Image (cartoon, grey):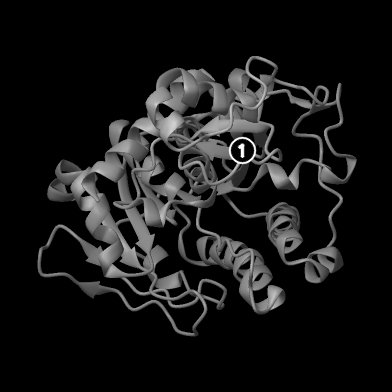
Amino acid sequence: MSSATISKGRVLVTGINGFIGVHVARALNERGYTVMGAVRHESKTVRLQRLLPQAVASGSLTFGIVPDIAKPGALLPQAVASGSLTFGIVPDIAKPGAFDEILSSEQPFDAVVHVGSPISFAPEDVERDVYQPAIEGTLGILRSIKACAPSVKRVIITSSFVAVADRSKGARPGYVYSEEDWSPVTREQGLENMRMGYTASKILAEKAAWNFVETERPSFTITTLCPPFVYGPADQVTSVRDLNESIAQIYAVFEGKTLMPISGYVWVDVRDIALAHVLAIESTAAAGQRYLIAGGKYSPQQVIDFIWGNYAERAKEKNISKGTPGNLWPEGDVFDVDTTKSQRDLGLKYRPFEECLSDTFSRIVELESEA
């Protein structure tokens, strides 16, 4: 397995039009990489073209189309009239060989970043709609890389903090989670509870990836990243109606519709988790490693205090509850996280929570003004 350092190579990114994926594309572009992104619809490339026009014009950012991950099909690359974009269709990432053709590109890839994974908290069928795309999608791309892309040296897989934390233990004051922890949620539990299904899918997909490396012994190495609640500027959307779940929760509070849910406790800025993907490509130490990527723990009260401290007029108008100002843990302390490993191996420096909140709300206000 290769642990070579990679820099300024060609990278395939799945889920590139999502909240994290957009920022991964930007981070890669800023560090000189050539990027090909997989999206579901050609229309999904429009936002990225506007965000990174120079990268698109120069050909350092291209796209492959993934129109519907729930329908069968095979990759069918097609030329695009603009010449600066190349598109391919991957109708079902869980189908064997779905990525074979795109990975057999005449321009070889040096690394793959697999961000794409379905998020559905109300699926009709957990096995079909959540497990299969997450698990088989991950295994499928690993198999395709092994079979068709011998040039790939590193694969970065976006897992989740839900694959780390044992939420059955609740707030767990005094406990510090690290990369050594694994959630005990089982496949069967995920089938019984739709929201638990997402947790199980992330655990099963990540474990499947590690098992693949152990049994198949590919020439590339993998690195998995486990982010918690992700906040920061929602650059992937043009309307507040399309906000991803973590930002939508904050927006609901900003609108006075609900109190901040007491369920997160741990956060990371989207730009930090995006950069972590790039640093994991470049770091020799990251080969074969799992990382907990988090800015630290937070109290929902901090979000409320920030809104009242920076958007007081709006808070009054929306009748936003003040909660317990300054009292971050009225019901007792909660668990913490150890991110020493990511800081040591990747050289990652996390943004302060205040900066993250400031940029999160600034983007929300911007989206509101554009409506």
Q: Which residue is mark 1?
A: 260
- Residue pictured at 82% horizontal, 47% vertical: 183
Residue 88 shows in this picture: yes
Reply above or below: 281 against 157.
above
Report x, y in % for residue 167: 82, 44
Up-down: is 279 above or below 225? above
Residue 52 coordinates in the image, percent (x, y):
22, 43
User: Considering depth in this image, is 278 or 332 the residue closer to the camera?
Assistant: 332
Give whichever of 227, 248 is nearer the camera: 248
Given the current orientation, which residue lies at the most extreme bottom position?
Answer: 72
Number of numbered markers: 1
* Residue at the image point whose x is 44% and y is 57% from the top: 14
- Front one among 168 and 176: 168
x, y (%) of residue 324?
67, 22
Q: Is residue 115 above or below residue 305?
A: below
Q: Residue at x 34, y 31 (%)?
A: 362
Task: Answer left or right for 120 relative to 370.
Answer: right
Q: Residue at x 12, y 49 (%)?
A: 57
Does residue 82 appear to the left or right of 218 in the view shown? left
- Quadrant of the drawing holding the N terminus: top right
Q: Residues within 10 Å of mark 1 (few under 14, many from 20)?
A: many
Classify 130 as above or below 181. below
Q: Is residue 293 visible?
A: no
How far across and how far down the image is residue 190, in percent?
79, 65
Local secondary structure at mark 1: loop
Residue 234: quadrant of the picture: top left
Residue type pointed to by label 1: Met
Give the left or right position of residue 358, taking residue 60 as reference.
Answer: right
* Farthest-out residue, right: 169
